[in-house]
Image: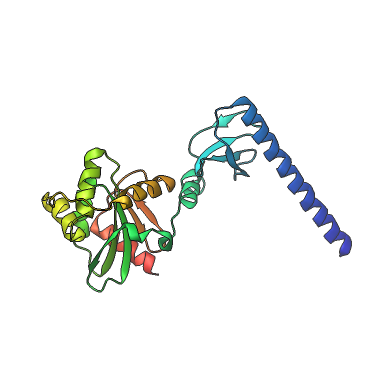
């Protein structure tokens, strides 16, 4: 058995050396030929033979051959399993653990027993957010951590500041989103708003609303009451 184990160890070492050499070649060739390409974070094999993933800027993906002679930007699909491998990889790279959310920069809305938890990033000028809020009103027994996420322009930042500085943030938010009634202009320490935008950019929250459930599942875009309930139930398992 010892010769077999030695041979397997040697094979593993040889494969590792080969993979390392290919990664080095890809890094070297792409850096020399595309000097404006940002620093490469990682090079890794994909399920497709001869195709390598090149990751930059944390979660931006490209694909190349073993020598970096070609560079592809696009979606890698597994047609047999009908899976978007690029999307799955980006979701994994940008996943946010619920416990890692900066909840001090959000205000909380509790309905019913509040046992289920949901975080939402929203812009006060987002039309889809207003539609989503109407559906969210029908969801009970939930704690909602609302992150003001003013990314649609200066007016969004101003409205967000008025809401954040209101005595009752939750009421001010609901009054605006459901009835278009803004609270009186107010000033306070609104550094949380800039922190939310910075956090969102880091984790590629590019649109509103964006929902994050207790199990880390992220859902971009407005979803209806039934889908919210479905995701809450799934996250609770």
Choose top left, top right, bottom left or bottom right for residue 64. Answer: top right
Q: Does the rendering let one see residue 48?
A: yes
Pinpoint residue 82: horizontal percent, then vertical percent: 47, 47
Of residue 81 and residue 194, the one placed in the foreground of this image is 194
Of residue 184 and residue 139, the one placed in the foreground of this image is 184
Q: Residue at x 62, y 25 (%)?
A: 33
Does residue 90 appear to the left or right of 107 in the view shown?
right
User: Of all residues shown, which one is farthest toward the front?
Assistant: 188
Does residue 90 appear to the left or right of 52 in the view shown?
left
Of residue 59 and residue 5, the one placed in the foreground of this image is 59
Q: Residue at x 75, y 43 (%)?
A: 18
Pinpoint residue 144: horizontal percent, then vertical percent: 28, 62
Pinpoint residue 237: horizontal percent, then vertical percent: 40, 70
Of residue 158 and residue 29, the one placed in the foreground of this image is 158
Q: Does the rendering let one see residue 125?
A: no
**Image vertical order of residue 144 relative to residue 203, above or below:** below
Does residue 216 appear to the left or right of 135 in the view shown?
right
Image quadrant occupied by the N terminus:
bottom right
Q: Residue at x 76, y 45 (%)?
A: 17
Q: How many labels does the image show?
A: 0
User: Of all residues shown, which one is farthest toward the top?
Assistant: 33
Q: Residue at x 35, y 52 (%)?
A: 219
């Amino acid at each position: 058995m010892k010769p077999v184990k030695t041979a397997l160890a040697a094979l593993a070492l040889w494969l590792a050396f080969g993979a390392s050499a290919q990664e080095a070649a890809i890094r070297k060739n792409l850096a020399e030929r595309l000097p404006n390409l940002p620093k490469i974070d990682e090079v890794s094999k994909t399920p497709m033979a001869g195709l390598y993933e090149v990751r930059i800027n944390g979660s931006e993906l490209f694909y190349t051959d073993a020598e970096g002679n070609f560079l592809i930007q696009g979606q890698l699909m597994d047609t047999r399993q009908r899976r978007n491998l690029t999307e799955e990889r980006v979701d994994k790279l940008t996943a946010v653990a619920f416990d890692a959310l900066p909840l001090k920069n959000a205000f909380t809305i509790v309905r019913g027993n509040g046992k289920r938890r949901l975080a939402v990033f929203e812009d006060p000028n987002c039309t889809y957010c207003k539609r989503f809020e109407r559906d969210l009103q029908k969801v009970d027994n939930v704690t909602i951590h609302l992150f003001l996420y003013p990314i649609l322009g200066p007016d969004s930042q101003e409205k967000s500041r008025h809401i954040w500085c209101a005595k009752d943030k939750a009421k001010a938010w609901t009054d605006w989103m459901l009835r278009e009634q803004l609270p009186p202009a107010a000033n306070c320490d609104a550094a949380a708003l800039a922190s939310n935008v910075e956090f969102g950019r880091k984790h590629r929250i590019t649109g509103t609303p964006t929902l994050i459930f207790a199990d880390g599942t992220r859902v971009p875009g407005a979803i209806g009451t039934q889908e919210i309930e479905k995701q809450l139930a799934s996250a609770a398992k």
